[in-house]
Amino acid sequence: MTEEKIDLSKSLYDQDAFSGRAAHFYRSVNPLNLFRDHAAAKELVDRVKLNKGVLPEGVTKDEVWDAKYVYESAYHPSTGELTFLPGRMSFQAPGNCIIASGMIIFYRTPIQAISGQFINQSFNSTVNYCNSPRPVFVPQDFLVAAGSACAAAFGLNKAASRFPPLIARLVPFGAVAVANGINLPYMRRDECFGKGMPLEDDDGNIVGHSPSLGKESIAKVVLSRILMATPTMVVPPVVVTQLQKPGRLLARNPALANPLTVLLIGLSLVVATPACCAIWPQRISTSIENLEPELAADLREKGIKTVHFNKGL
């Protein structure tokens, strides 16, 4: 009888289709994974890898795929060590829900706006550190990220005082968008302005670097991050502001404003996080004809027609 095998280096879902990518990321960031048995999941995944993909007796493929997603939600992708709780992918939704709620509810003064952005960037830095290929904390990157967010929050908060209340409630979103546009290119500056995006051949060997693909990839990541924040930080303030008008629900029951804000943020995160991560494939293949002429000519001489790269998230 043929042994049943499974390739855990790949996703269970079709990564060439948006629906497949969305399903993949939904399972990766599912907060319910926080309450699963991570040690048991790791043990099963390690057994399957050790057996070169052969399923252990009495274990189904569904059980192995389930273990893979539980494992990847809690363990570092390179070191295999259990990740610090706030840095786990499964903590993204609850962590962002708490922080976004704080930024949207407490927004009126510059101190509140700056504090919210500082906490948000501290959380983002923790996630980046816990999930990077080489977990090394770079204070300079954190200072640029936090500084840009806090400066944007301060400036926008001051400017918003001259506009209707709804504009003031959108200050946290504006600061997050500005910060993403600054700190992501800065943190990945080598891919964007230095050597360029590392390119691999079909066997996974680095065959060159492309600054143009680096810029394109980072632009897509910045856009997806801003789109991810849009329903979370725009929809709740707009809805709450409308419901606070005379005669409407929150005008009659003002105590419901904050709970409703948190609920809307939580629902938005559940949908927006996997959906925006899935807009573009994380791993992309492209023809060498799309590269810089000199690099394309060099690869053509080596007989390489297609290269692959990781866009990032």
Image (cartoon, grey):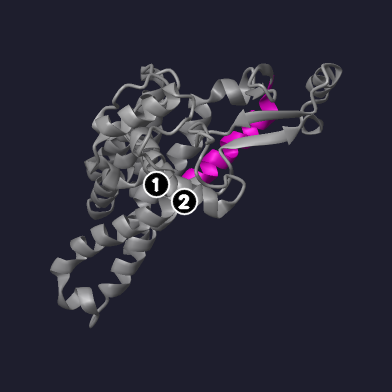
Q: Which range of residues does the magenta coloring cover?
A: 209-227
Whether 89 is drawn above or below 48: the answer is: below
Q: Position of residue 93 (x, y in %)?
A: 32, 47
Q: Position of residue 251 (x, y in %)?
A: 20, 75
Report the residue at 35% width, 36% height from top.
73
Marks 2/1 in contact by CB < 8 Å: the verdict is yes
- Going by the numbered disc 2, the residue's amino acid type is Ala
Q: Which residue is mark 2?
A: 23
How many labels sit on residues? Answer: 2
- Asked whether 229 or 305 is in front, the reply is 305
User: Left or right of 285: which side holds 101?
Assistant: left
Mark 1, Cα crowd under 10 Å, few <14 / some 14-19 / many 20+, is many
Q: Main secondary structure of the magenta part?
A: helix
- Asked whether 16 or 238 is in front, the reply is 16
Report the residue at 54% width, 54% height from top.
19
Q: Position of residue 7 (x, y in %)?
A: 52, 33
Q: Which residue is mark 1?
A: 27
**The quadrant where residue 211 appears:** top right
- Going by the numbered disc 1, the residue's amino acid type is Arg
Rounded to the nearest whole Å, what is the CA distance between mark 2 and mark 1?
A: 6 Å
- Asked whether 127 or 18 is in front, the reply is 18
Report the residue at 25% width, 30% height from top.
39
Mark 2, Cα crowd under 10 Å, few <14 / some 14-19 / many 20+, is some
User: Left or right of 9: which side holds 164?
Assistant: left
Provide the secondary structure element on which disc 2 rests: helix
Provide the secondary structure element on which disc 1 rests: helix
Q: Position of residue 129 (x, y in %)?
A: 37, 25
**The quadrant where residue 170 appears:** bottom left
- Residue 128 visible to an observer of this rendering: no
Report the residue at 46% width, 38% height from top.
180
User: Left or right of 54: which side holds 127?
Assistant: left
